[in-house]
Amino acid sequence: MPRELHWTDVEEIAIQLYEQDPGQDPLQVRFTDLRDRVMALPGFADPREKCSEKILEAIQMAWLEEYQEA
């Protein structure tokens, strides 16, 4: 069973997003879609209300780093 993920687990979220869709350019994903993708990850446990634009930006940049390293 996957461990619980929270909005603050930026690096782990980014890795999982990249692994789910390695060909997706993170800069082409709208924040509303990014939020929904994160919330759909296995083990994600935080409520939507804890999400902020700042957190989504951090996730997007960490995901971009994973994407560019491939």
Image: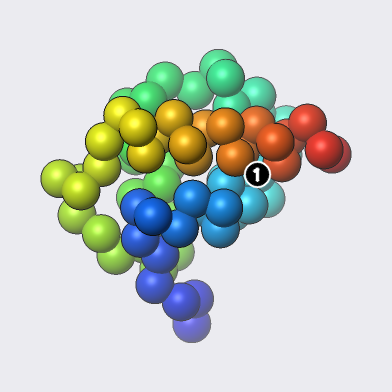
Picture coordinates of residue 63, whole percent (x, y) = 61, 38
Of residue 2 and residue 11, the one placed in the foreground of this image is 11
- Badge 1 element: helix
Say which residue appears at 26% left-offset and 36% top-offset. 52
Q: Position of residue 61 (x, y in %)?
A: 57, 32
Is 41 on the left-hand or right-hand side of 50? Answer: right
State whether residue 28 is above or below residue 7. Answer: above
Residue at (29%, 65%) from the top-left corner? 45
25 over 19 or under it: above or below? above
Task: Estimate the x, y position of residue 6 in percent, counting from the top left.
Answer: 35, 60
Disc 1 marks which residue?
18
Reply above or below: 8 against 26. below
Residue 20 seen from this side: no
Answer left or right for 12 relative to 65.
Answer: left
> For residue 62, what is the image quadrant?
top right
Foreground of the two, 69 or 45: 69
Whether residue 31 sits left or right of residue 24 in the image: it is left
